[in-house]
Amino acid sequence: MCAGLLRAQEDQLNRVHVPPPASATPGAAQGAPAGAEAPPESGPNALRARPGSFLRMNVDLVLIPVTVTDPMNRLVTGLEENDFQIFENGSPQKITSFSTEDAPVSIGIIFDLSGSMLSKLLRARDAILQFIKTANPEDEFFVIGFNDRPALIEDFTSSVDQIEARLATVHAGHRTALLDAIYYGVAKMREARHERKALLVVSDGGDNRSRYTEGEVRARVREADVEIYSIGIFDPYAPTPEERSGPQLLDDVSRETGGRMYRVDDVDELSDIAEKISTELRNQYVIGYRPRDLSRNGKWRKVKVKLNPPPGLPPLTVYARTGYYAPLQ
C-alpha cells in the first residue's frame, strides 16, 4: 500500500494540532469580547503583534473586499469607483485603488465532523467539493475537520482530487469544538500564498467543547485579514444554550469580517449555497485607500463602506470588513 494512501487513512482528528489557549494574564478581562476595547501589545510582544494584519506594515495601504447585493440577495456587479465612499473612524478617505478582477484567494475549509453531522456528512462533503470546483483555478485550499478538537485534514493545495480523497476518509462523531477550529483556521492563514484570504465554515451547531473563548476568537478574527463565510445547518429545536447561540455567533463573526452566514433549511440546498459563496468570492470589488491617520499605535480603526449607486437601482446592501488594527511600528 502506498504511503499517500496510508496517510489518507489515518484518523486525523485524533491528532491534536491546535495549541491550548495561553494562561490568562493578571488583570485581563475573562471572556469579554475583545476588539476595539482590547489594549495594544507592548514591550517585546509588540514586535510580533498582529501577524497578517489588515494594514500592511510597509505600504500603509488598506485593501477592503466588498460584496454588494440587491433586495433579492443577488450579486450586483458593474459598479464604478465613484459609486463608493470609504470612512475611517468617521473621516472620509480618498480611494486610491479599485478593482473587480477575479484575483486568486487562499481559502480554509472548516468542516464540522461532530456526531450531529452524521446524517448530513455526505451532502456537506459534496457541497465543499462543489465550492472548490467552482473556485478560481489558482485558488489554494486547506481543510480543517473538527469534533472534540480541530485537526488538519489537508494542507494547502490546489488539487481537487487530493482534497476529495482526504474527505472520503472522514467520519462524524463526538462533540463540537467550533471556536477552536476557527481560531486554528485563522492562525493557519499565516502560511497563505495569496493576499486575499477567506474561511468557509460548514457547521450545524454551537460550540460545546472548545478551550478558546468566544472573546479570544473574536479578538483573533479582528486581528486577521481573513473573510469568513459560514454555512449553518442548524437544528430549530436545539437542546442546549450553546447550540441555540450557534447561529448568532457565526453570523456575527462572518459579518464583522465582510463575509456572510447562509442558513440552510434543507440539506439538499447545500451544494447550491456553496457554489453561490464561491461565485461571490470571484465577484467582489476590492477598494484600497491610504489612511489619513498614519499614527502607529495598534488601535482599532473603524471602517465604513457607503454606496451611492446610480439612479434607478433598488436599495442595495454592502458587505465589508468593519475595521482593522493600526500597525505598531
Image: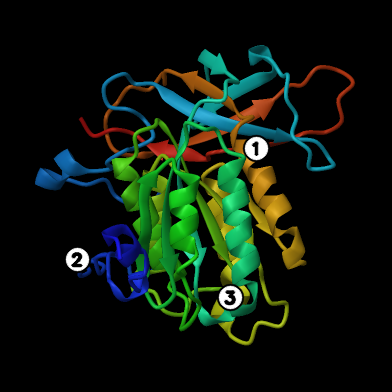
Q: Nearer the viewer, residue 10 or 215?
A: 10
Question: Could you tell me which residue is drawn at 20 percent across and 70 percent down?
Answer: 23
Residue that badge 1 annotates: 280
Residue, far left:
44
Could you tell which of marks 2 and 1 lies nearer the N-terminus? 2
Do we see residue 220 in this rendering?
no
Would you say the residues marked 1 and 3 are in contact, meaning their CB atoms lie under 8 Å apart?
A: no
Question: At which x and y percent is residue 103?
Answer: 51, 25
Question: At which x and y percent is residue 59?
Answer: 31, 18
Closest to the camera, between mark 3 and mark 2, is 3
Kind of element beneath mark 1 = helix
Residue 312 is drawn in which quadrant? top right
In the rendered image, which quarter contains the N terminus? Answer: bottom left
Could you tell which of marks 1 and 3 lies nearer the N-terminus? 3
Image mark for residue 117: 3
Q: Nearer the viewer, residue 276 or 284?
A: 276
Q: Is residue 329 left or right of residue 156?
A: left
